[in-house]
């Protein structure tokens, strides 16, 4: 973890969400103006956070694996911009994971440490196993980032109840979309082909 | 209270461009006047950006390099036109007046940027600033807007504005490095400076410090009246 959990929460406004969730666990009935239903996370909120944390853990694992492969010479000559991207993305997914786990703990759920296995098998492993250069890795992580961003978008559009959790999900979605654009550019594809972000690639479990 | 929106979500899945006209009136959310203000402000932002991009693509200082830069700018301009149309349609779907004027605060930023000699780097930095304002405004709006369809639209547009901002940061980095030839598609990743791998994503979670006020671009006369 790069930073402490409180710093994440403060930096992203998620301390409000944590406080709101905490107030719901002590039997209090105070209403929060920051949520349409008084700050109480629904089961759907918490279920989504668990899914998202598992996906962030998968991203951390995938980027770490890519960095290890690069360091071990398995990807040939990795471009400077590529190395920079892999490291920054790894660290930021680690930050996102810590932030999500912070909210989960405030909601009396266990933090998530294990990567999402379904997405690992369907999105990551098929491409990463045969990757021998940076561009191959870039295609894999671009697809993973697309899937994560679509998952956050779908949740923001439908599942989430607490506004600070919406803000967190949308904030992670926005950064994920930035990564998708840069990776697409690096692999030779147009960085923003769709006028409206799609949810086709969203992960459900 | 949020509700499952499978039928409306289907309108937003895939290309929303073809679904804009399908965003029909539906029961309003808990705070319709505020939702209309948010949509009018979003419309005003998109109109200001569309006009700004038009001025940018006409700049001689963009040069005659790889056609990718011009294609990217023109595509982005057109996407903002689609966003404006979608926001305006959704405004009327909620019973509000369409906003047909650019956002005054953003327009001021644009005019200031074009007041002197505008280099390609100046223009890209302006575009990045506008996209960041839009991204962070729409991000904040996702927590403020009650109408479910409007929020679906807001979040979907936000994801694309974020991509625009990212590419402008990369392009600005390449211009600043004196490497305009690398603003090309396809590009050779090996030639990109290290900064190209990190400049687009300074934050793990997008902040909202640059968001404009949700009512800063309402139609003259208020949320429910004509322009």
Image: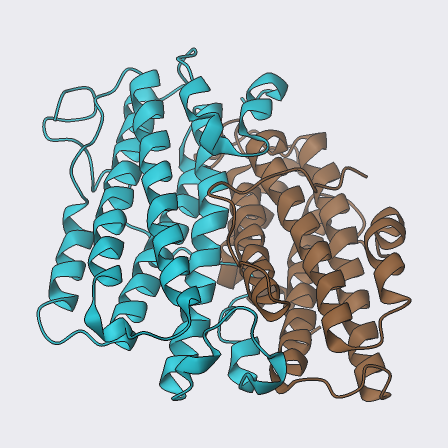
Residue under the image location 46 percent in, 43 percent down:
A195
Residue A61 visible in the shown view: yes
Give the image quarter of residue B225: top left
Residue under the image location 20 percent in, 71 percent down:
B60
The spot of residue A114 in percent (x, y) is 86, 57
Q: Is residue B198 above or below residue B67?
A: below
The quarter of the picture where the C terminus of chain A appears is: top right
Residue under the image location 37 percent in, 30 percent down:
B86
Of residues B173 and A11, the one nearer the viewer is B173
Task: Please indicate whether residue B81 sits to the left or right of residue B159 in the image.
Answer: left
Of residues B40 and B163, the one nearer the viewer is B163
The spot of residue A169 in percent (x, y) is 58, 47
The quarter of the picture where the N terminus of chain A appears is: bottom right
Q: Is residue A77 above or below residue A153?
A: below
Give the image quarter of residue A96: bottom right
Task: Please indicate whether residue A171 sits to the left or right of residue A88 in the image.
Answer: left
Residue A22 visible in the shown view: no
Count of numbered tags: 0
The spot of residue A93 in percent (x, y) is 67, 64
Task: Please indicate whether residue A113 sits to the left or right of residue B214 in the image.
Answer: right
Chain given the colour cyan: B
Q: Is residue B175 above or below residue B135?
A: below
Of residues B93 and B124, the one nearer the viewer is B124
The spot of residue B183 in percent (x, y) is 45, 74
Colour of chain A in the rendered structure image: brown
Residue under the image location 60 percent in, 66 percent down:
A188
């Amino acid at each position: 973890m790069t930073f402490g959990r409180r710093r994440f929460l403060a930096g992203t406004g998620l301390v409000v969400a944590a406080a709101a969730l905490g107030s719901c666990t002590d039997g209090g009935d105070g209403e929060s103006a920051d949520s349409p239903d008084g700050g109480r996370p629904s089961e759907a909120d918490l279920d989504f956070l668990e899914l998202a944390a598992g996906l962030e853990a998968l991203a951390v694992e995938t980027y770490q694996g890519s960095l290890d492969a690069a360091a071990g010479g398995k990807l040939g000559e990795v471009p400077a911009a590529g190395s920079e991207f892999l490291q920054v993305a790894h660290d930021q997914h680690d930050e996102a994971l810590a932030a999500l786990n912070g909210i989960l703990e405030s909601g009396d759920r266990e933090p998530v440490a294990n990567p999402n296995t379904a997405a690992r098998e369907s999105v990551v492993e098929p491409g990463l196993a045969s990757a021998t250069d940076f561009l191959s890795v870039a295609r894999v992580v671009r697809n993973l980032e697309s899937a994560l961003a679509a998952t956050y978008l779908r949740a923001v559009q439908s599942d989430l109840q607490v506004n600070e959790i919406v803000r967190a999900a949308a904030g992670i979605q926005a950064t994920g979309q930035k990564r998708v654009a840069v990776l697409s550019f690096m692999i030779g594809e147009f960085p923003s082909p769709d006028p409206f972000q799609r949810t086709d690639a969203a992960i459900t479990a | 209270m949020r509700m499952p929106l499978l039928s409306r979500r289907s309108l937003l899945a895939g290309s929303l461009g073809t679904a804009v006209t399908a965003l029909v009136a539906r029961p309003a959310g808990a705070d319709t006047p505020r939702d209309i203000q948010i949509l009018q402000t979003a419309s005003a932002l998109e109109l200001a950006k569309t006009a700004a991009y038009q001025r940018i693509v006409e700049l001689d200082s963009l040069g005659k390099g790889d056609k990718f830069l011009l294609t990217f700018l023109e595509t982005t301009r057109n996407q903002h036109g689609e966003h404006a149309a979608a926001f305006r349609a959704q405004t009327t779907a909620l019973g509000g007046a369409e906003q047909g004027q650019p956002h005054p605060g953003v327009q001021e930023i644009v005019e200031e940027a074009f007041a002197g000699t505008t280099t390609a780097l100046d223009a890209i930095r302006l575009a990045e600033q506008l996209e960041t304002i839009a991204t962070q405004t729409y991000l904040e709006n996702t927590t403020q807007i009650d109408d479910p369809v409007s929020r679906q639209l807001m979040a979907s547009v936000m994801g694309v504005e974020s991509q625009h901002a990212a590419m402008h940061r990369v392009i600005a980095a390449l211009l600043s490095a004196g490497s305009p030839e690398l603003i090309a598609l396809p590009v050779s990743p090996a030639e990109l400076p290290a900064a190209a791998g990190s400049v687009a994503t300074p934050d793990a979670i997008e902040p909202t410090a640059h968001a404009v006020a949700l009512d800063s671009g309402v139609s003259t006369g208020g949320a429910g009246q004509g322009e």
